[in-house]
Image (cartoon, grey):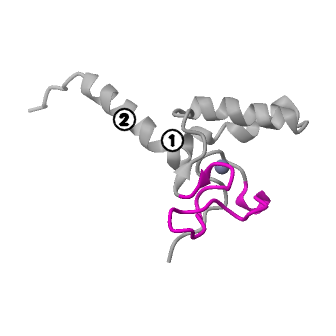
Amino acid sequence: MEKTCKFCQSCGMPLKKDEKGGGTNADGSKSLKFCSLCYQDGKFTSPGITTAKEMQILVKGKMKEMGIPGFLAGFFTYGIPKLERWRSLVGQGDTVRVRETRGERRRG
Ligand SMILES: [Zn+2]
């Protein structure tokens, strides 16, 4: 059984608020991870957005259009880098940092 996510794993919007109830997979089934704004027919609708930061800017802009105050928009977009779509990107960055770690001398 697939786990249903409460929030879109791309933009962080509550999937309950999605009027279509979620995005669609390539086979036409409902996506339980992404909202209909982010994900349709198995593809992300905004290919220009490649980093969590760009997504944060996009979502903040949308919220502004909806009349949501800036501090609330900041609150909602704060967790975006931790969402599934972006987590793998963060992981890649970490790998680079690990390689720079100086080797510790073994005790004994
Ligand atoms: Zn979304």
Q: Nearer the viewer, residue 108 or 54?
A: 54
Q: In the image, is residue 62 part of the stretch drawn in magenta? A: no
Marks 1/2: CA distance? Answer: 10 Å
Write down the region rendered in magenta.
14-41
Q: Secondary structure at mark 2?
A: helix
Q: Please name the residue that numbered disc 1 is placed on.
A: 86
Q: Is residue 1 left or right of residue 100?
A: right
Magenta-drawn stretch, dominant element (helix, strand or loop): loop
In percent of width and height, residue 79 lies at: 63, 41
Seen from this angle, which residue lies furthest bottom?
1
Q: Residue at x 44, y 37 (%)?
A: 89
Viewer-proximal residue, 16 or 90? 16
Figure check: 2 above or below 36? below
How many tags in the picture? 2
Q: Nearer the viewer, residue 77 or 105?
A: 77
Indicate yes or no: mark 1 CB to ligand 1 under 8 Å.
Answer: no
Task: Give the quarter of the figure containing the C terminus.
Answer: top left
Reading the chain from its start, which is encountered first: label 1 or label 2?
Answer: 1
Q: Residue at x 69, y 50 (%)?
A: 37
- Residue 8 percent across, percent down from the top left: 64, 53
* Residue 86 seen by the camera: yes
What SS does tag 1 mark?
Answer: helix
The answer to whether residue 23 is left or right of residue 97 is right
Residue at (88% x, 33% y) in the render: 69
Amino acid of disc 1:
Trp
Q: Is residue 26 left or right of 21 when viewed as pictured?
A: left
- The residue pinned by badge 2 equals 92
Residue 74 appears in the picture as rendered: no
